[in-house]
């Protein structure tokens, strides 16, 4: 993560310089006019001044607001990744917007390069490590950044996990990584396969039957300062998903290393809460498992029993994430009696068809909670879209031989809605939100706020949600 400082004056004239300009400011700026820079919200240009200094102009569009500042700073950082330092002129921006410069630049400067043994021959090495934001409101901007940086750290932690290859991030290794969160004051408990079997996690264990790497349950607790039940975050942590017996096609199966992005986002959100010392008590329950082919792998038509006693007919072994979440949601509800539960999962291809790589699907049983989730997503640039959760979707999951089926065995079905209805059963009466992040967990190309690959989607959203909704004593 970038080292960030807020200063009033530029003391590093050798560093790359970025200027963020609205359309009106660009029209009045001599350099912008000279090079035909209009200040559009998607615009960026660079060049050398008379001293040889690298100067970047990034457009803010009609006006400076959090999203445009964040994106412009990210675009500027994306052009100077081969530099050691970047100085950004915050000008007369309010402290809150000056801090967003650091958010955008930090998100864009992230790289997963720990497995590279030599520099990338197609471009400069990612050496950008220091950011200085020039602003008259340096003290206030620094205070805002101290809060926002926690969410950025959580998102980058999630990205690191998602980017890790599955042979290096088995369920056991994932759990070991999570133990490091104890350094930030988070209580970490890892429950092994024997513990899961004794407590009846039949749905989760069924998913892991074909793998040589045993499943486990990670429970992260942040005590907070408010004396009440916690907010619960529940994450799908399938560290690799072959589809099981219902084998996926080879094309892009390599992306299934990211099928644990929901668990990574929940872990990142917990780190954010701890870093900013949130008063809200929180618990994250992460089901960590591989869905592999093997002699013991579960089969279509198998019936498994969830931790709350519900029997589930397995129609499709590639609809495994909802089985993992069923046990995690039911156990969380029973063991922790949370004020609300939010699960995050790369769950269905159907949500990608519906929303593409632009928004996550939002399914909710509580309208007020859904509104807060949507507001949090817009605030941090991780947008969601409300989807239906009608009773008819649950009716379609009736089984002849068990309490419920895990999906509908037919083509052209609304599987994202069926999956949400399936999960709703295990949430019980607890206010519940399901975020289907398939499609937004990975970027196909570089963007304003990150390179191609892992996005960390959900970590900053959940952190902002807790701040908006759950940090008041009566919230």
Image: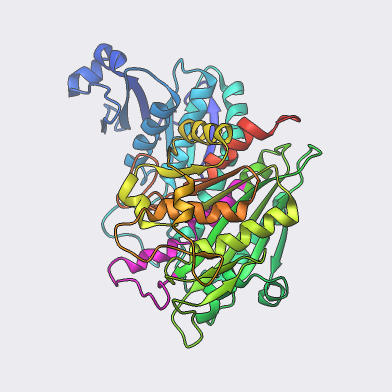
Residue 401, position as x, y percentages in the image:
52, 72
- Describe residue 229's horizontal placement relative to residue 309 as left or right: right
Answer with the quarter of the image where residue 243 lies: bottom left
Residue 390, position as x, y percentages in the image:
47, 44
Residue 197 or residue 465, whichever sits in front: 197
Query: Which residue is at 68% across, 60% downward?
Result: 331
Q: Is residue 453 above or below residue 460?
A: below
In the rendered view of the protein, which quadrant contains the C terminus? Answer: top right
Query: Which residue is at 20% across, 17% downward?
Result: 33
Residue 248 or residue 258, whichever sits in front: 248
Residue 81, position as x, y percentages in the image:
37, 45
- Describe residue 282's horizontal placement relative to residue 111 as left or right: right
Residue at far front of view: 400
Query: Which residue is at 56% across, 47% downward?
Result: 154
Residue stretch in magenta: 241-269
* Colour treatment of the image: rainbow
Q: Is residue 432 above or below residue 166?
A: above
- Residue 356 visible within the image: no
Q: Is residue 247 above or below residue 160?
A: below
- Residue 317 visible within the image: yes
Query: Which residue is at 70% across, 77% downward?
Result: 194
């Amino acid at each position: 993560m970038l080292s960030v400082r807020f200063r009033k004056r530029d003391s590093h004239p050798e560093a790359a310089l970025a200027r963020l300009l609205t359309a009106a400011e660009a029209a009045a700026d001599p350099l912008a006019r000279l090079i035909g820079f209009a200040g559009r919200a998607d615009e960026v240009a660079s060049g050398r001044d008379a001293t040889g200094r690298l100067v970047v102009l990034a457009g803010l569009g009609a006006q400076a607001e959090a999203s445009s500042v964040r994106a412009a700073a990210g675009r500027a950082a994306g052009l100077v990744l081969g530099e050691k330092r970047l100085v950004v002129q915050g000008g007369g921006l309010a402290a809150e917007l000056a801090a967003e410069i650091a958010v955008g630049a930090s998100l864009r400067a992230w790289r997963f390069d720990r497995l590279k043994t030599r520099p990338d021959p197609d471009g400069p090495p990612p050496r950008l490590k220091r950011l200085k934001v020039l602003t008259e409101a340096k003290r206030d901007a620094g205070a805002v950044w101290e809060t926002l940086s926690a969410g950025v750290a959580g998102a980058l932690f999630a990205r690191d996990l998602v980017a890790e290859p599955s042979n290096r991030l088995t369920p056991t290794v994932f759990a070991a990584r999570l133990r490091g969160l104890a350094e930030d004051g988070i209580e970490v408990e890892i429950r092994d396969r024997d513990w899961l079997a004794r407590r009846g996690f039949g749905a989760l264990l069924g998913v892991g039957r074909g793998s040589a790497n045993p499943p486990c349950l990670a429970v992260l607790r942040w005590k907070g300062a408010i004396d009440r039940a916690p907010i619960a975050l529940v994450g799908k942590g399938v560290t690799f998903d072959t589809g099981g017996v219902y084998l996926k096609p080879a094309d892009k199966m390599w992306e299934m290393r990211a099928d644990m992005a929901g668990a990574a986002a929940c872990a990142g959100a917990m780190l954010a809460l701890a870093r900013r010392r949130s008063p809200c008590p929180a618990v994250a329950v992460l089901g960590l498992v591989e869905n592999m082919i093997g002699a013991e792998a579960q089969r279509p038509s198998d019936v498994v029993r969830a931790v709350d006693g519900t029997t589930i007919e397995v129609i499709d072994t590639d609809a495994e994430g909802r089985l993992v979440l069923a046990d995690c949601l039911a156990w969380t509800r029973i063991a922790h009696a949370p004020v609300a539960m939010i699960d995050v999962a790369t769950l269905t291809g159907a949500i990608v068809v519906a929303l593409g790589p632009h928004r996550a699907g939002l399914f909710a049983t509580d309208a007020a909670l859904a509104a807060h989730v949507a507001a949090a997503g817009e605030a941090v640039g991780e947008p969601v879209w409300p989807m239906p959760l009608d009773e008819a979707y649950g009716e379609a999951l009736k089984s002849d031989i068990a309490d419920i089926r895990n999906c509908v065995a037919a083509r052209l079905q609304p599987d994202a809605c069926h999956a949400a209805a399936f999960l709703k059963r295990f949430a019980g009466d607890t206010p519940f939100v399901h975020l289907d992040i398939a499609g937004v967990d990975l970027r196909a190309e570089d963007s304003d706020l990150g390179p191609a690959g892992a996005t960390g989607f959900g970590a900053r959203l959940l952190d902002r949600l807790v701040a908006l909704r759950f940090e008041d004593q009566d919230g």
